[in-house]
Image: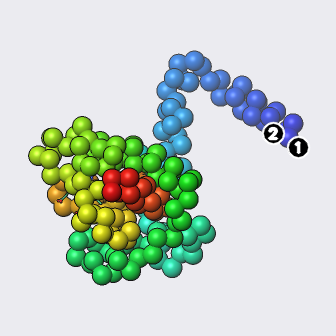
Amino acid sequence: MRCNLWLALALGLAVTGCTREQWHRFPSPDDVIAAVPWFSVMHTGIAIQPYKMPRQPAEGAVPVTGIEVVPPPIPQNEAALNRLRNPVQQTAASIERGRDRYEIYCSLCHGDGGVGDGPVAPALANAVRDLTDPRQVARSDGWIYATIRHGFGALMPEYGSKISPEDRWHVVNYVRVLQGAAR
Ligand code: HEC
């Protein structure tokens, strides 16, 4: 059966006598694939660029690994943010992970020690907050978590699309270490 198929194909080619010139008139394989509706979906599909969040799951979708619980916007919802419970214990591993993320994403503005003296701070008219300031120490874990998720004011960008929910809690745990060291 398989043999017959190849034979038929070979015979067909021999009969049509496909020359080299004719071969070059054939469209490129990409065009052929794009012409098939099912394949063209792959051509026109929306690509997710680096640093972009994947699209939200469809309504009613059941999470397999758990989805993010988005904290309410900051600074309007202080009471609700204060009620957010930090689910990540401040273990040595958590602090280490938090330090790693902090030094990638936060120290450029807030400085390695958290006092707001990162190399970018002068470019922001020194508006960067000293995280070891008593007012910041008094902030709840949920408040700091929401600051990372949504950004703060006009000058601090959001890091929700770059730092996973769990990592944000690790960063919170590490900020607490910086605050403790400064006291
Ligand atoms: C581009 C510079 C920049 C980066 C990067 C940055 N911040 Fe900020 N951050 C700011 C500025 C500026 C403010 C003060 C904004 C204001 O008061 O309007 C601020 C404020 C804060 C505050 C105080 C909010 C309050 O209650 O007043 C916290 C907490 C904070 N940042 C944490 C972080 C953490 C954690 C990271 C890393 C994930 C980070 N920031 C990354 C610039 C930055």
Image point (53%, 56%), residue name = 94
Rendering coords of residue 143 (x, y %): 32, 69
Regarding mark 1 in the picture, which secondary structure is present there? loop
Instruction: Give the vertical position of 70 relative to 174 (above or below).
Output: below
- What residue would you read off at disc 1? 1
- What residue would you read off at disc 2? 5
Q: CA distance from mark 2 to mark 1?
A: 6 Å
Rendering coords of residue 65 (x, y %): 59, 67
Amino acid type of the residue that numbered disc 1 sits on in the rendered structure: Met
Image point (39%, 43%), residue name = 104
Rendering coords of residue 27 (x, y %): 49, 33
Viewer-proximal residue, 162 or 144?
144
Rendering coords of residue 105 (x, y %): 36, 47
The quadrant of the picture showing ligand 1 is bottom left
Instruction: Give the vertical position of 85 relative to 149 (above or below).
Output: below
Image point (22%, 76%), residue name = 76
